[in-house]
Image (cartoon, rainbow, N blue to C red):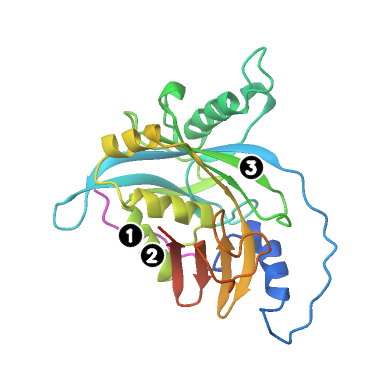
Amino acid sequence: MLHRRWPGISGPPWSRHWSSAAAVAAARPLSGGARSVRVVTTPVQQLRPAATVVVVRDGEAPGGAPRIETLMLRRNEHGQFGGMWVFPGGRIDPDDYPVGASGDELGAARRAAAREAAEEAGLIVDEEGLVPFAHWTPPALTPRRFSTWFFVATAPEGSVTVDGGEIHDHAWVLPGEALLQRDRGEIQLAPPTWVSLHRLAGYADVPTAIADSRLRTPEVFTTRLAPVEGGTVALYHGDAGYEDAVADRPGPRHRLWMVESGWRYERSS
């Protein structure tokens, strides 16, 4: 198991990819507040299909207890998700669609995820072994919006190789440790990556993670943002404040708190 500190990363506390949408949410008043509302006329950007693969292998937690590890890549400081730690992934290209099945986005997403694993990490992942994990859509006012399929896959044989261009570094990491490092300000994670790591942290080994993912219907996250004291919350389906993006509406919770004291996932049972 890898035991090293990841390179420190400076910058905003969540993805630059979502920064404009977060700024719009922050401009809205809290319920009962006196803050004025600035009208934003930014048009909603068209969704672009994309795919990501969460590559996992068996590892050990400190003390020797079995625990899953996942591969993460650090993007360069420029462009989409600049400087962030991510899973291998990218947009779905026209050539990724199966011949004669131009509407098969899931099939295209599988091919794109496998292709990106090879291009970004030098790993040959079997398309047929990719298990749907979740689907993510960012807030409506996010620039360059990607509608992304997440898959989980067992790590194949071979060493990870990055090009030093688009991808600057890689690490096999315990999901729980990655979450702690984000709160310590050592790394940056996008909200979908954070929530995926939170789920992975509950698995002791790869067979359990794969089997559980095969049994589940992939969860669909369409994100809405709302301001709160000390930061922002990302609201997901089932949250009482989801429909109108009001964070303090009483009722059930399904959200990611992105606040100064740390990030926290809250979901009513």
Mark seen at residue 181: 2
Q: Which residues are magenta?
A: 1-9
Kind of residue indicated by mark 1:
Glu
* Residue 144 pos. (x, y %): 71, 49
Q: Residue at x 42, y 69 (%)?
A: 183
Q: Nearer the viewer, mark 3 or mark 2?
A: 3
Amino acid carrying mark 2 in the image: Gln
Answer few, some or many: residues within 10 Å of disc 2's Cα (few below 14, many 20 plus, some between 14 and 19). some
Give SS at disc 1: helix
- The structure residue drawn at horizontal position 66% and vertical position 29%, both measured from the top left corner, is 93
The answer to which of 218 and 185 lies nearer the viewer is: 218
Give the alpha-carbon distance from disc 2 to disc 1, as whole Å.
6 Å
Q: Main secondary structure of the magenta part?
A: loop
Q: Nearer the viewer, residue 103 or 193?
A: 103
Q: Disc number at residue 165?
A: none
Q: Are marks 2 and 1 in contact (CB under 8 Å)?
A: yes
- Please tell me the numbered disc located at residue 177: 1
Which x, y percent locates residue 30? 66, 79
- State the residue lying farthest toward the left: 63
Q: Is 34 displayed left or right of 200 in the figure?
A: right
Position of 6 compared to 24: left or right?
A: left
Q: Quadrant of the C terminus?
A: bottom left
Sort mark 1 into few (<14), some (14-19) or many (20+) by Cα contacts within 10 Å. Answer: some
Q: Is residue 111 above or below residue 269?
A: above
Residue drawn at point x = 84 percent, y = 71 percent: 39
Q: Is residue 249 visible?
A: yes
Element carrying mark 2: helix
Separation of marks 3 and 2 at Cα, in angstroms? 27 Å
The kind of residue tagged 3 is: Ser
N-terminal-most mark, 3 or 1: 3
Task: Please give the residue where the numbered disc 3 appears in the rendered image.
Answer: 147
